[in-house]
Image: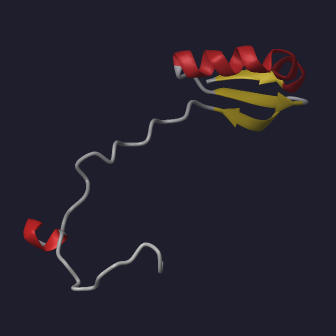
């Protein structure tokens, strides 16, 4: 884990953020030698594709309520 003084982080912030995103390396920002912040890459959230479970049969998904819907009244 790499450490960097706050002043240098301030001067090179965008470049360092790009480095963290590219390399996956964590950077600890220090002030007067003490850690004050940790910059680490964000993990991609898992895909939600295929995660839906229907609790009804396919023929129950679409059905008529028997109501006549009039767009002018709605």
**On the rendered image, what quadrant is the N terminus found in?**
top right
Q: Residue furthest bottom?
A: 66
Task: Residue 36: give x, y in percent of width and height.
Answer: 80, 38
Apparent side of residue 63 relative to residue 73 in the rendered image (left or right): left
Q: Nearer the viewer, residue 13 or 64?
A: 64
Instruction: Inspect this view and state whether residue 54 appears.
Output: yes
Q: How many marks?
A: 0
Q: Nearer the viewer, residue 19 or 28?
A: 19
Instruction: Inspect this view and state whether residue 55 appears.
Output: no
Give the residue drawn at x 29%, y 82%.
68
Task: Residue 16: give x, y in percent of width and height.
Answer: 71, 17
Which corner quadrant of the image does residue 29 belong to?
A: top right
Apparent side of residue 31 relative to residue 66 in the rendered image (left or right): right
Give the residue drawn at x 45%, y 36%.
44
Give the residue drawn at x 57%, y 22%.
21
Give the residue drawn at x 81%, y 30%.
30
Which corner quadrant of the image does residue 5 belong to?
A: top right
Q: Please determine whether, in this image, residue 10 is positioned above or below residue 45.
A: above
Task: Residue 56: give x, y in percent of width and height.
Answer: 14, 73
Colouring of the image? secondary structure
């Amino acid at each position: 884990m790499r450490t960097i003084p706050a002043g240098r982080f301030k001067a090179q912030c965008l470049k360092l953020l790009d480095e963290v995103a590219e390399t996956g390396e964590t950077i600890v920002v220090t002030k007067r030698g003490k850690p004050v912040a940790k910059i680490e890459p964000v993990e991609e959230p898992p895909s939600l594709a295929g995660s839906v479970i229907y609790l009804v049969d396919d023929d129950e998904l679409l059905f008529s309520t028997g109501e006549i819907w009039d767009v002018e009244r709605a």
